[in-house]
Image: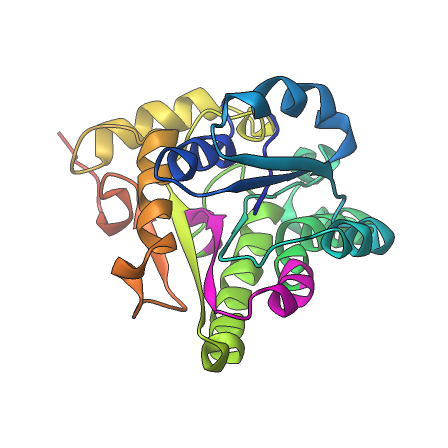
């Protein structure tokens, strides 16, 4: 079950393709405004079980989506993040209550809501994962309130891992390096961020959607059966650098 496919550049779409190629049966959940894109993309998955509208802010849609399930869930992918453009226009201290609430509800609290509905459909345990970014642990210019939301999301991962461990459900986060996606297009000067990341990361490269998808596949399978509550960095090593090259 994958939440968050918005376009062919979405990390969620890359994960859907990777898991499908490895034999997983895929069910996509999307927001209404992305219907036409998902409708065009979904048939490319060889093990597609369906795609259905599910707005995580609307309890009636959540109930309808999970109520329609016919088979158990083994894997849950949460790849949802959003903050209004006005949240990036000013400083963090100027963030309105409305913008803060929206960012937190969509980007963090939705993980808890999804698992609330998913757990009854996971009788055999399974793996849940979400996507985060370095801005959840360190200050990243222009990321602003999304950094606060990602910090909350990573805290959700730890709390859910502790809560759901006895049910044999693992919960982890993948902290991806910057990737040019539809969501990233709303962050000012994102091209400069990509260029700087590549110049500083030990591997001197930017990560791709496919790099994240392969890590997601690892977290989805039994090879990672003793990993839970973790935030795993897939960023070419950028997160380990304290002082970048000075020459």
| Residue 126 belongs to magenta span | yes
Q: Residue at x 41, y 68 (%)?
A: 229
**Camera-side residue of 234 and 211:** 211
Question: In the image shown, does 175 or 29 lie closer to the viewer?
Answer: 29
How far from the left and from the top, in percent, is residue 26? 53, 40
Counting from the top left corner in percent of width and height, residue 63 is at 80, 56
Q: Is residue 120 left or right of residue 180?
A: right
Q: Quadrant of residue 215?
A: top left
Count of all numbered marks drawn on residues in the image? 0
Q: Position of residue 128 (x, y in %)?
A: 49, 58
Look at the image and give the residue range highlighted in magenta: 113-136
- Asked whether, in this view, residue 30 is left or right of residue 74, the answer is right
Magenta span has 235?
no
Where does residue 205 sit, x and y in percent of width and height?
23, 28
Above or below, comparing residue 183 to residue 234 in the picture? above
**Which residue reaches farthest front?**
70
Residue at x 22%, y 47% (from the top left corner): 241
The residue sitting at 53% across, 71% down in the picture is: 160
Q: Quadrant of the C terminus?
A: top left
């Amino acid at each position: 079950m994958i939440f968050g496919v918005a376009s062919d550049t979405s990390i969620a779409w890359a994960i859907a393709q990777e898991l499908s190629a490895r034999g997983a049966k895929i069910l996509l959940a999307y927001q209404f405004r992305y219907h036409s894109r998902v409708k065009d993309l979904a048939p490319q998955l060889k093990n597609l079980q369906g795609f259905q509208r599910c707005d995580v802010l609307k309890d009636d849609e959540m109930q309808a989506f999970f109520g329609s399930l016919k088979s158990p869930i083994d894997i849950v992918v949460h790849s949802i993040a959003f903050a209004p453009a006005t949240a990036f226009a000013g400083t963090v201290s100027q963030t309105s209550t409305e913008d803060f609430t929206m960012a937190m509800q969509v980007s963090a609290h939705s993980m808890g809501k999804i698992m609330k509905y998913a757990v009854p459909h996971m009788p055999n345990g399974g793996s849940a994962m979400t996507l985060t970014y370095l801005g959840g642990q360190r200050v990243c210019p222009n990321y602003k309130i999304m950094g606060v939301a990602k910090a909350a999301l990573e805290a959700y991962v730890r709390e859910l891992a502790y809560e759901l461990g006895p049910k044999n459900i693992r919960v982890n986060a993948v902290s991806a390096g910057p990737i040019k996606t539809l969501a990233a297009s709303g962050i000012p000067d994102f091209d400069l961020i990509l260029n700087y990341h590549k110049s500083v990361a030990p591997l001197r490269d930017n990560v791709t959607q496919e790099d994240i998808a392969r890590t997601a596949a690892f977290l989805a399978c039994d090879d990672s059966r003793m990993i839970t509550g973790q935030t795993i960095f897939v960023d070419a090593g950028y997160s380990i650098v304290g002082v970048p090259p000075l020459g």
